[in-house]
Image: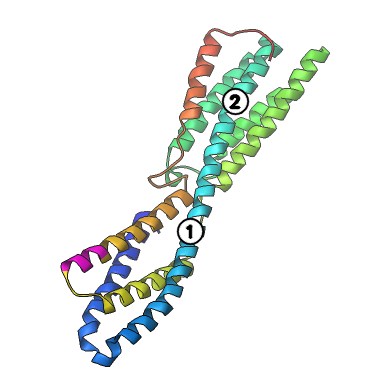
Amino acid sequence: MSSILASLLALFAICGSAVIGLWLAPKLPEHHLTGETGTAVSVSMAVVGTLAALVLGLMVNSASSSYSARTTAIEALAADIIKLNRVLLGYGAETAGIRDGLAAYARAKANEISRPASTTDEVGVTTLHELEALNDEVLRLEPKTDRERHIQARAISILENMVDARWTLVEKSKMVMPAPFFVMLVAWLSLLFASFGLFAPRNATVMAFLLLGASAIAGCVFIILELGAPSQGLIRPSADPLYQVVRELQITIVRPVHGPA
């Protein structure tokens, strides 16, 4: 279920419950709508509201963590690509082909991240093979001095970090909200708004603010699902760090700067 569809379903369910409460109020006997009854209903609904708010808060925090982890992984991957390129430059001309492959990998990974997951392979098999090929090429280097051996070991270490960042991107691509959990949460909120409608005056101001409250909750559901699935939908981490790396690598390839890694 898409985040837009889920948020719209939540909005309709909550608004519908409020309307049912407004419709039901005149049909109940007077003694069902006394102040004591309203107080009892308010106290019980306060428990439901607190529970729903707690669950929503935890879900927002979890979704935000998933989004932040993916953003951090993209930035770490971009930094590691730059570091690996500098290390390979320090090795010498023998790594020119590897650096070309590294630039191609950076470009492919940036394009992969900038596309929604629904239009690409979530595991990113193509870029995985490119990264594994880079690792194999670094391992095939034949260092002749202690300095070259140190650079090779450093390059292998950076590649391992790139692999870790890559799998973080895969693992943080989607946070699944089970359908029964979503239905239960919407049911809690619908019950809460039905109680609002039951005891609220029937006028345009009340209905407008009930609609705004339901819209705010639907927006919260939308944000949770969008942040929880940062590889698809409307809100995705930017691939700009990787595109910036691609531009820097192109400059480096044209004008290599030999120096210490």
Question: What secondary structure is the magenta-colored segment mainly?
Answer: helix
The magenta segment is 204-209
Left or right side of 147 for 188: left
What percent of the width, then of the height, locates residue 179? 46, 66
Compared to residue 58, the image places residue 21 above or below, namely below
70 part of magenta stretch: no
- Say few, some or many: other residues with alpha carbon within 10 Å of mark 2 (under 14 / 14 to 19 / 20 or more): many
Amino acid at pointer 2: Ile
Residue occupied by mark 1: 57
- Say few, some or many: other residues with alpha carbon within 10 Å of mark 1 (under 14 / 14 to 19 / 20 or more): some
Q: Which mark is residue 216?
A: none
Q: Which mark is residue 81?
A: 2
Q: Residue at x 58, y 32 (%)?
A: 77
Amino acid at pointer 1: Gly
Q: Secondary structure at mark 2?
A: helix
Compared to residue 102, the image places residue 239 above or below, namely below
Q: Residue at x 27, y 78 (%)?
A: 199
Q: Residue at x 55, y 22 (%)?
A: 103
Instruction: Using the image as rendered, state which of residue 143 and residue 260 is in the foreground.
Output: 260
Left or right side of 234 for 97: right
Q: Secondary structure at mark 1?
A: helix
